[in-house]
Image: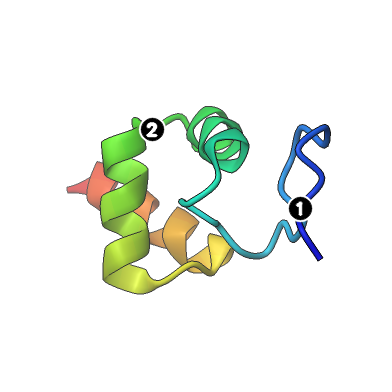
């Protein structure tokens, strides 16, 4: 089943899908990062939103 593009947030808030423009907009705003930072974080730790948040937090603490 295809995602409903009228929905403003992600279908599954525990996962980050960088293939959908509306999810990229949601997550970059929610996490306060650029699209490139988000893509890099997902590439490094996977699509689990909690792991991405933690990874980004650790990067900011350095």
> 54 or 49: nearer the eye?
49
Q: Estimate the x, y position of residue 13 in percent, counting from the top left.
A: 72, 56
Vertical placement of residue 56 versus 8, above or below: below
The quarter of the picture where residue 48 lies is: bottom right
Q: Secondary structure at mark 2?
A: loop
Quick check: can you spot residue 47? yes
Foreground residue, 45 or 20? 20
Dot 1 falls on a residue whose secondary structure is: loop
Q: Residues within 10 Å of mark 1 (few under 14, many from 20)?
A: few
Q: Which residue is pictured at 24% across the width and 50% down the height?
A: 59
The percent position of residue 18, horizontal first and vertical second, equals 46, 51
Q: Residue at x 35, y 35 (%)?
A: 35
Q: Indicate left or right for 38 with 14 as reference.
A: left
Q: Which mark is residue 33?
A: 2
Q: Residue at x 48, y 34 (%)?
A: 28
Q: Residue furthest left?
A: 62
Residue 22 position, x and y percent, is 61, 34
Q: Would you place residue 39 above or below residue 54 in this image?
A: above
Judging by the rendered image, the residue that carries numbered circle 1 is: 3
The image quadrant that residue 5 belongs to is top right
* Marks 2 and 1, the one that precedes in the sequence: 1
Residue nearest the observer in this picture, 28 or 32: 28
Crowd rating for badge 2 (residues with CA inside 10 Å; few <14, some 14–19, many 20+): few
Q: Identify the image's colour scheme: rainbow, by chain, secondary structure or one colour.
A: rainbow
What mark, if any, has residue 51 been given in the picture?
Answer: none
Residue for point 82% across, 45% down: 4
């Amino acid at each position: 089943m295809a995602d409903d593009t009228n929905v403003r947030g992600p279908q599954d808030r525990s996962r980050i899908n960088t293939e959908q423009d509306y999810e990229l907009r949601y997550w970059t705003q929610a996490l306060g990062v650029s699209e490139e930072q988000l893509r890099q974080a997902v590439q490094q730790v996977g699509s689990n939103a909690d792991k991405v948040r933690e990874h980004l937090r650790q990067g900011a603490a350095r």
